[in-house]
């Protein structure tokens, strides 16, 4: 990987998304876009950014300045649109962003290189071809949002196959998106995904903007030598603010030792889980540490089940049981080593990952 402290490595075309809160208007906010920058020259030369500020959406040109990374890989980004970030370089083409615009906007996210296709503006719909997992999390007028699904893109703007699970403020929907969703991709890597109305029965989630990344980059594990690319996702609906990813998928066995991380939102607050579980013969056993709105528990027993969806390879349904409570779970396999998981209950909304240890 390119050095995180080498200014020459932090250059070229990038895609980014950030999400947080607009504390002036008391609404959720997200930003995303594509840009060309150079830490060596200290410039953000050009780009386009997209905003979803509590459902108010718009886009505009983007430029600015930046500083070179220090010995810890930290630098700053200043955009002419009035946004400022600190960045921490994981490597030259992967930056973690923390907003500096408090108390007005609090946000954080990531920036990923787009490779030669971004530098030459040669992305197209063909850049999204094959099997993928799509997921996003955020908020809608109905409450907390969690969405996960899978699709096959034909390289011409169509989803030949696909399904999605959505939990929108406790209203859950499982639907097909085969032949119903369409996508676009411009040369700079910015594009759109139009989901059918059946995806969200509440009626808030249908329009996404996406930003393609370098196929050599693994979005969910940037230090991995195995890439895959995909795209960053930003909800562009008037009643939903969320961000996520599109990542290549491959199917395989669901067994072995997994690390588990999950975040739930309910009327009583937020609950975060981190732990370990073993998957074998359709069953899960393990333990998790829990922080439920400041009330912590360590080593809580977890059990669960999972059953393959015979009609949609790579999707499983099942449950987690922790502390006497059972949670309905849908599992989407990114690879045999990684799953995106969503809670499909009416009492809470949750999204997370299971990854082999």
Image (cartoon, rainbow, N blue to C red):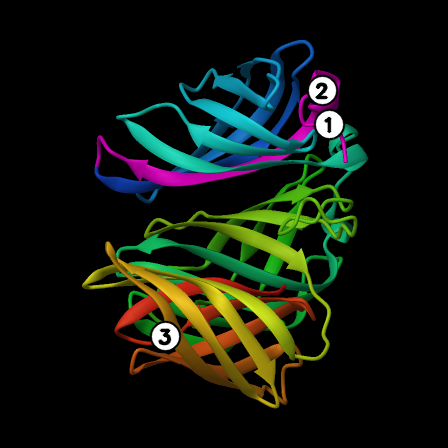
Q: What element does badge 2 sit on?
A: loop
The residue tagged 3 is 172
Residue 15 in sight in this render:
yes
Horizontal side of 193 relative to 25 (left or right) equals right
CA distance separating discs 2 and 1 = 5 Å
Which residue occupies the extreme top position in the image?
41
The residue tagged 2 is 6
In the displayed structure, would residue 254 be above or below residue 231? below
Residue at x 38%, y 63% (from the top left corner): 289
Query: Is residue 241 a member of the stretch shown in magenta?
Result: no
Nearest the camera: 342 or 159? 342
Residue 314 image offset from top left, x and y in percent: 65, 77
Q: Circle 3: is it few (<14), some (14-19), or many (20+) Cα within 10 Å?
A: many
Of badges 3 and 1, nearer the viewer stands 1
Q: What element does badge 1 sit on?
A: loop
CA distance separating discs 3 and 2 = 46 Å
Q: Which residues are magenta?
A: 1-25
Q: Quadrant of residue 121?
A: top right
Residue at x 58%, y 64% (from the top left corner): 181
Horizontal side of 327 relative to 161 (left or right) equals left
The residue tagged 1 is 3
Q: Circle 2: is it few (<14), some (14-19), or many (20+) Cα within 10 Å?
A: some
Which residue occupies the extreme front position in the image?
299
Q: Quadrant of residue 338?
A: bottom right
Residue at x 45%, y 69% (from the top left corner): 342
Label at residue 49: none
Contact check, label 3 and label 1, Cβ < 8 Å: no
In the displayed structure, would residue 8 be above or below residue 175? above
């Amino acid at each position: 990987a390119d050095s995180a402290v080498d200014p020459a490595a932090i250059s070229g075309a990038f895609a980014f998304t950030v999400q947080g809160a607009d504390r002036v208007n008391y609404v959720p906010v997200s930003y995303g876009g594509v840009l060309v920058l150079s830490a060596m020259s200290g410039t953000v030369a050009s780009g386009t950014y997209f905003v979803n500020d509590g459902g108010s959406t718009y886009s505009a040109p983007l430029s600015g300045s930046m500083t070179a990374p220090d010995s810890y890989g930290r630098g700053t980004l200043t955009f002419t649109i009035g946004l400022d970030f600190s960045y921490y370089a994981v490597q030259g083409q992967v930056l973690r962003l923390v907003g500096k615009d408090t108390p007005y906007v609090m946000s954080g996210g990531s920036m990923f290189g787009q490779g030669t296709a971004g530098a030459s503006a040669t992305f197209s719909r063909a850049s999204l071809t094959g099997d993928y997992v799509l997921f996003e999390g955020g908020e809608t007028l109905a409450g907390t949002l969690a969405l996960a699904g899978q699709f096959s893109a034909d390289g011409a703007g169509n989803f030949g196959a696909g399904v999605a699970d959505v939990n929108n403020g406790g209203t859950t929907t499982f639907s097909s998106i085969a032949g119903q969703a369409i996508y676009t991709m411009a040369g700079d890597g910015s594009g759109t995904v139009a989901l059918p109305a059946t995806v969200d029965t509440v009626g808030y989630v249908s329009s996404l903007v996406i930003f393609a990344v370098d196929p050599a980059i693994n979005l969910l594990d940037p230090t991995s030598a195995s890439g895959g690319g995909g795209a960053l996702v930003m909800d562009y609906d008037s009643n939903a603010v969320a961000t996520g990813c599109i990542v290549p998928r491959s199917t395989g066995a669901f067994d072995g030792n997994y690390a588990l991380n999950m975040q739930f939102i309910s009327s009583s607050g937020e609950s975060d889980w981190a732990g370990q579980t073993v998957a074998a013969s359709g069953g899960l056993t393990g333990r998790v540490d829990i922080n439920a709105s400041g009330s912590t528990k360590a080593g809580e027993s977890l059990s669960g089940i999972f059953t393959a969806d015979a009609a949609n390879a790579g999707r499983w349904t099942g449950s987690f049981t922790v502390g006497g409570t059972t949670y309905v779970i849908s599992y989407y396999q990114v690879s045999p080593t990684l799953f995106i998981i969503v809670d499909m209950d009416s009492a809470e909304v949750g999204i997370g990952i299971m990854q082999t240890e």
